[in-house]
Amino acid sequence: GEYGLQCEHCSKMYRNRSDLKYHLRTQHNSTFQYNCVRCGIGLSTRLDVERHQSDAAAKHQNSCEFCGKTFVTASGRHKHLKLMHGYKRFECDVCHKRYRTLKDRNYHKKTVHQGIYRYYCAKCGRGLHSLARLNRH
């Protein structure tokens, strides 16, 4: 869609007049009926204040320990950690090595700690992780 309406105060663009009016009322009008006690933002309704404070509380609980970015949901935080910081949330209970996926952690436990491999050499019985490694062996 076209964004044809521009806010005269901050240059943000809006598709329709009602979105622009809402933006002007909530972001640039100093005569709000309600204000957030934490950050001071002006809001038009009590429900807007409750939503704003609920989102802020959730974001505080779901902040990234590496960069401080905040998220409304825990799943948003986990996705961020995985993509931005290479976060490995699945830990081996034997050696404490960490993995990005449960599948990788389980494969590690089977092969390293339990000695279970996908491929075995027919001549010497050695276990190997992949068919390519078996062929090289």
Image: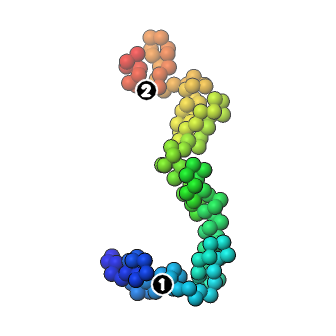
| Residue 78 seen by the camera | no
Left or right side of 87 for 38: right
Mark 1 or 2 closer to N-term? 1
Q: Is residue 31 left or right of residue 124?
A: right
Based on the displayed image, in which of its 4 quarters is residue 3 positioned? Answer: bottom left
Q: Which residue is mark 1?
A: 24
Q: Decide which of 121, 128 is in the foreground and name it.
A: 128
Mark 1 → mark 2, Cα distance in angstroms: 61 Å
Residue 48 against residue 131 in the figure, above or below: below
Q: Nearer the viewer, mark 1 or mark 2?
A: 1
Tag 2: amino acid: Ser
Q: Is residue 96 visible?
A: yes
The quadrant of the picture occupied by the C terminus is top left
Q: Residue at x 62, y 87 (%)?
A: 33
SS of the residue at dot 2? loop
**Mark 2 highlights which residue?**
130
